[in-house]
Image: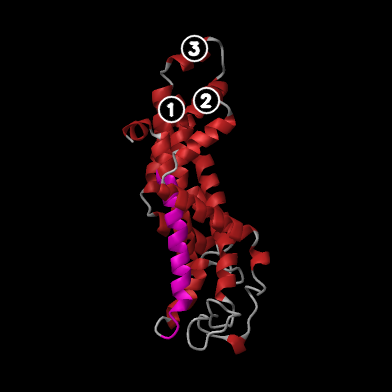
């Protein structure tokens, strides 16, 4: 089967939920990439004379500001578009960092076992004992808010699930015939781990990464809501929620649209993640 035929066969298995999630996710990615071309407003420019303009279909709204403006006169739609850059960047990089750390630790722990396995898994237990969001808040309170610090904290704090899943996979794989054959032929542990064992662990890792990306977006928004995420000068959905909570009774659109945007983004990733899980899990695939 060629790559083209494989892609066509995979596309035919897309459920309507997964198709919807994929379309929405692609729209968000394109929106983040072409943000400067999609709007003529500056997301950080303050214009007090335009403050608190309602959406264009409300009384007092203007077509120039389709979703209205915030308390500083900044265009909400523009800030939502540019805010997608932060959410997508944090989701991808933090998930990559967490996955890389977790996969490496899981490979080492599962393959070598013994004291190495005990030490690494106790480290995982200690980190898992702390609530994820509280650990991120504590670390960011010390390091200070910032995009790089946020990515590092979310990445380092999220490796435990990857490590445990990969460790379990490796423990079951290291007793298989192809691993024993590679060792008998003189392959070094490094070669066995990364050439023979790791390719068989990608399925669960990809599924976990898809759901972790959605959780990372929510965590980033939560930390930005608390003032511990990205700097105020950078548009962020969480920061927009925090700014709008003070005006819920007078101008509910300030918090409503960022909240809806976060919900739609996370839902689209979860729908796509469910499909990936169904495709990569033979038991679910065969039952479908």
- The residue most toward the left is 287
Snapshot quadrant of residue 131: bottom left
When the figure is inspected, residue 98 is found, relative to residue 247, above or below; the finding is above
- Magenta segment, which residues? 250-274
Q: Is residue 26 left or right of residue 256?
A: right
Is residue 18 on the magenta stretch?
no
Q: Which residue is mark 3?
A: 181
Is residue 269 on the magenta stretch?
yes
Q: Residue at x 56, y 62 (%)?
A: 84
| Most foreground residue, 21 or 139 | 21
| Distance between the alpha carbons at the discs numbered 2 and 1 | 9 Å
Snapshot quadrant of residue 280: top left
Which one is earlier in the sequence, the residue at label 2 or at label 1? 1
- Residue 264 visible in the snapshot: yes
Q: Which residue is mark 1?
A: 170
Percent x, y of residue 109: 45, 31
Quarter occupied by the N terminus: top right
Q: Residue at x 47, y 15 (%)?
A: 178
Q: Main secondary structure of the magenta part?
A: helix
Q: Which residue is mark 2?
A: 193
Which one is earlier in the sequence, the residue at label 3 or at label 1? 1
Which one is earlier in the sequence, the residue at label 3 or at label 2? 3
Q: Residue at x 42, y 58 (%)?
A: 133
Secondary structure under badge 3? helix
| Distance between the alpha carbons at the discs numbered 3 and 2 | 13 Å
Q: Which mark is residue 100?
A: none
| Most foreground residue, 41 or 44 | 41
């Amino acid at each position: 089967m060629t790559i083209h035929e494989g892609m066509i066969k995979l596309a035919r298995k897309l459920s309507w939920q997964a198709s919807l999630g994929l379309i929405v996710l692609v729209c968000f990615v394109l929106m983040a990439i072409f943000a400067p071309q999609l709007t003529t407003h500056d997301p950080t420019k303050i214009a007090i004379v335009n403050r608190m303009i309602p959406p264009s279909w409300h009384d007092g709204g203007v077509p120039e500001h389709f979703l209205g403006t915030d308390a500083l006169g900044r265009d909400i739609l523009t800030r939502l578009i540019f805010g997608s850059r932060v959410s997508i960047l944090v989701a991808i990089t933090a998930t990559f960092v967490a996955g890389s750390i977790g996969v490496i630790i899981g490979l080492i722990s599962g393959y070598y076992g013994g004291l190495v396995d005990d030490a690494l898994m106790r480290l995982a237990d200690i980190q898992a004992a702390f609530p994820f969001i509280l650990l991120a808040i504590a670390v960011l309170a010390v390091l200070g808010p910032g995009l790089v610090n946020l990515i590092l904290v979310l990445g380092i704090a999220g490796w435990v699930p990857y490590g445990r899943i990969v460790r379990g996979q490796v423990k079951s794989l290291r007793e298989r015939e192809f691993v024993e054959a590679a060792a008998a032929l003189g392959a070094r542990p490094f070669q066995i781990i990364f050439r023979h064992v790791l390719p068989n662990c990608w399925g669960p890792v990809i599924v976990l990464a898809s759901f972790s990306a959605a959780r990372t977006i929510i965590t980033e928004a939560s930390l930005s809501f608390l003032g511990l995420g990205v700097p105020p000068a950078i548009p962020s959905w969480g920061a927009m929620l925090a700014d709008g909570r003070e005006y819920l009774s007078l101008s509910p659109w300030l918090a409503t649209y960022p909240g809806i945007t976060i919900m739609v983004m996370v839902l689209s990733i979860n729908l796509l993640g469910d499909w990936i899980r169904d495709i990569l899990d033979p038991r679910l695939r065969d039952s479908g």
